[in-house]
Amino acid sequence: MGSLGLTLVLLGASLTPQFSYDQLFSVQRQPRGVRIEITPFYQWMFGSTRVDEFSQVGSQLSLSRDLGMKNTLGMKGSLGTRLRHWLFEIQGLWYPFRGKGRLPYTVAYDEALLPAQIPFQVEGSFTQIQGQVGYSLSFQKNSFQISPFFGIEYTQFSLGLRSRAGPSSSEYYGQFLPYPILGIEMEKEWSCFSISMQAEGTFFQNWSTFQEEGGTLKMSISEFRFQCKVTFFISSFAAWYIGGRIWFFQSRLYSPREDDNRFHLWSPALLFGMVIGL
């Protein structure tokens, strides 16, 4: 009887699943290979804009208070690949500007003067394209990886004011030149989810473009983004995530004798997206 009990104990032990530390905490949970990422987001908008044209000094307009641009829905998508250590990615972001206002004073914007107490509408859009190359340092024992990266980014956007009872004006804020951006991403993985943080930014000042408008147009951009997200693994080729982002963006496009376009934005956002590995 004693030998039978010992046999059953040994048989049960052999049938019990054996989990190693590396199996339970593995940095290979994320979809690898070619990855497609789709991210709708909801964004609040704060900041200001001003457009000077020739000798006319533009009005300093608040995006949320004066122009009614309080929030918006947008879309971000990316296509990339993650090899053993190297990361390659191309991503694009787009969202529309919509708002309306009616101010107690005359508004000077671009070449137009919008009369006081006359309602106007605001329309425009923001597009940003970025390419990234990064190098991932993985720490298998604690399932942590850190990835510094370098990118090239291009931004263009337009913002127009239109009034049925008065003049209308639209200004194009195309930056004309791509600019460098630096960042770092950190990620900690568990068996079925991960937490990641990403910070990136640029400080690109007083660069001459190839455009002439009252002299050579120059551009300046200061930008910083911080993003945190929680990713849930559905399978080896799919995952979905939720997260948040805070974004600071400051742009100036100007020439010596004609233009001086300024746009300042800071914007928190909620993110919800999906990653698909091919």
Image: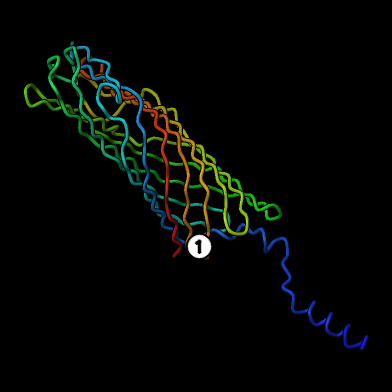
**In the depicted structure, whether residue 78 falls above or below residue 48:** below
**Residue 37 at least partly seen:** yes
Q: Residues within 10 Å of mark 1 (few under 14, many from 20)?
A: some
Q: Is residue 222 left or right of residue 28?
A: left
In the image, residue 30 lies at what x, y percent? 54, 58
Q: Who's the residue at 20% across and 33% down the image? A: 123
Number of marks in the rendered image: 1
Residue located at (57% from left, 52% from top): 194
Instruction: Judge left or right: residue 197 versus residue 70.
Output: right
Residue at 72% in and 61% down = 21
**SS at circle 1:** strand
Position in image of residue 52 (x %, y %): 22, 16
Asked if residue 254 can be seen in this view, the reply is no
Q: Nearer the viewer, residue 2 or 262?
A: 2
The residue where tag 1 is placed is 234
Q: Residue at x 80, y 82 (%)?
A: 11
Identify the amino acid type marked 1: Ile
Residue 85: image location, x then y, percent: 57, 54
- Which picture quadrant has residue 211? top left
Q: Residue furthest left?
A: 165
Query: x, y percentage for residue 154?
Result: 34, 38
Q: How is the image coloured?
A: rainbow
231 left or right, relative to 61: right
In the picture as drawn, the residue positioned furthest to the front comes out as: 1
If the image is split into quadrants, where does the C terminus sit? bottom left
- The residue lying toward the viewer, choosing from 255 and 228, is 228
Instruction: Please say if 278 is above or below 73.
Output: below
